[in-house]
Structure formats: C-alpha cells, structure tokens
Amino acid sequence: MIRNLFNCISIHNGGGIVYLSLMHNDLDKKGNLILLDERARYKLKPFLHAEIKYLKKNLFRNIFVLNERLKHTLIFRNYKRKKNKNEFLNEYYLNGIPPFFRFSTFSNRVFILFQNRNLFYYLNYLNGQLFISFNFIIYHALHSTLINIFLKETDFILTQTKTMFKLLSYSKPRNKVILKDLYWKNLNLESYLNKTNNNTKISCNFEKKQIKMIEEKAANNKLFFYPASLDPHKNHKRLFRSFNKIHKMNYKKIILLVTLDSSQLPRETRNNKQIIFLGSQSIKFINQIYNLVDFLIFPSLNESLGLPLIEASLQNLPIIASDLDFVYDVCKPSLTFNPFCEKDIFRKIIESVE
C-alpha cells in the first residue's frame, strides 16, 4: 500500500535533480509512489523498491496526478477505517508547488518543499533579469499569487536553511514551517559524487572538446564559474554588466563560464569574448568544471539552499558570493560583495585576481 506520495513532476534538471539524487535512499522505499518528469528518467539512479511513474509534459499530466492522488487517498481512507490505525497518507510536493485541490478526508497530510522563486518575484528581484516585459511581470505575479493562495491546502512547509526557515516563519504564520536539512549538512565529496552519479546521456566527444577548451583557457586566465539558470533572482544582469565593464577596460585574463545558452542573451553580452556559454550541463560535467576553474562566483539574490555553494565547498574551491544570510548558511565565502551593486561586484572580481 502507498503511504507516501512524492510529486516531482516539474523537476527535470538543475538543483532539483541534484536534491532528488541526495534524497534517493529515502525515496527508494516500499510504500512510496514517486511521480517523475519523463525528462528525469536518465538523470537519477534506478529506483528498486519505490513505485515510479514517469509523466510526459502535456495537457493531461495534471489530470493524471489528480487521479493518482484521489485513488490512493480513497484506498488509504478505507484501509484506515478498517484497521482503525493512527496513520496518514503523506503527500510531498518537492517541486515547490502546493496542491490546488485538497480532498476532504481525515487520512492525508500535505508537505511542500518551498522554493524561493515562489516568494521573491517582486520588482526588486525582477530588476536582476535581463529581459523584462509586461507579460513576464504579469505571468510571475499571477504565479506567485496562486502559489501563496493555495498554501492554505498545505499542512507543513519544509525548508533547508535557517534563513529560509526564519523568513517563512515570519511571512507564512498560518503554516507550520519545518527546518529539514539532513540531506546536505553532513556531505563529503566522496558521498556527494556517489549520490549524484547520474546516467545522463551526453556526447563524449562534445564533453571532451568542452573540457579541453576550459583547460586551455585555465592555462593563462583566471576562470570564474557561475552554474545557474536564467531566473531573475540569479542576478545575471549585474554580473554580465560587470564583465562587460571588465572587457571594455581590457582585463583580458579574466573569464566567466556560465551554464546558459548565448541565444538567450543581449548582443553586447553574447559578443563578449571573456564570457563562455557552456549551455545546460550534467551534474558530472559541472563537477569536472569545479576542478578546472579558480573561483565560484555567486551573485544570487536569494536561494532556498544554494547547491553550487555546497558543491564548491566540497571541492575546496574559493567562493566569491553575495553578502547575504543564505550564503553563510551553507558555506564560508572567500570574498563577498553587495549583489545589488555592479560596482562592488566588479571591484571584488578584480580584487580576487590581483
């Protein structure tokens, strides 16, 4: 019988996949049903004990999830009535999106692993985005509003750092907030690499070319690495402006590596030869890059965890990061800067190489 239902349907890359890898042992147990995105199939170790259902991204996916929730809730309710046991069907929303419907039953509890993007889409953070349109603002404003409305359907909010715990305890007083950080706090490099040893299908030739190119750049340059998606709170706008200034001032031996596609970016940034666009990369490849670069630079404005900070710390890579509480929760940075100030970011980059 299913006792724990894990909804992970929108997780298919980035930090979400890494965290699922860290949770693998706890997820892979009898009595667990895990709903996964089809795109995550080859990015996680095989599950041997849990029941897994892979869902394609289409219009019917949410209907399938609703059907699974209803089916197992009813089964569990009938079981509980017959056995008269004080047990619950636990629903975990690891994708950060709470359920929009709560079934009227006494037998289920709802947990959500809260993601910072659901809390911080207001104008100060949107200012870190490279492309802001009216439609972009409306979309994220509606998304954030809906998330916060439907949090009333959630019994417990799970957090991973003290900063997020304090923030949510203050801003969401109607929900019970739980600090749960067992998956990352006691990691060492060997255990981390073992847990995140995924089966991602990649081109070996392409990977070798990328590694060789980075090795050649590392011979005569100082390399800064920022593995992050192009979300507003990641603050690429100020980082790229700092590197555009570095380029114009002819600091030729400073290079930035980012895991973005250059087609997403403005021409000025795209044509900056001191910025290398690697595109989306596997966990294995990113861990190889940590061994080749000189610094992790992390200008993010807020994180629910900040996995690159943990990864870089495990590799003993110097970290230059935002002078914000979430950074100190998970690492000891070598240098910090004001992430809202391009001049300070620029200054600290130059200071780190002199």
Image (cartoon, grey):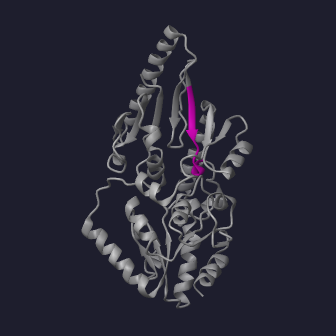
* Residue in the picture at 68% in, 52% down: 163
Q: Indicate whether 21 appears above or below 204.
A: above
Judging depth in this view, the residue of 255 and 214 nearest the camera is 214
What percent of the width, then of the height, locates residue 239? 57, 73
Q: Which of 85 and 133 is in front in this view?
A: 85
Residue 271: image location, x then y, percent: 43, 80
Q: In which quarter of the image is the N terminus?
A: top left
Picture quadrant of residue 207: bottom left
Q: Quadrant of residue 302?
A: bottom right
The number of numbered badges drawn on the structure is: 0
- Magenta region: which residues? 109-118
- For residue 334, side relative to residue 80 (left or right): right
For the C terminus, give its image quadrant.
bottom right
Above or below 96: residue 76:
above
Say left or right for 125 vs 191.
Answer: right
Determine whether 305 is above or below 148 in the image.
Answer: below
* Residue 143 within the segment the image draws in magenta: no
Q: Position of residue 197 (x, y in %)?
A: 37, 54
The residue nearer to you, when weighing 61 against 47, is 47
Residue placed most toward the observer, 319 or 270: 319
Farthest top residue in view: 82
Residue under the point 42% across and 70% down: 289
Up/down of 246 relative to 293, above or below: below
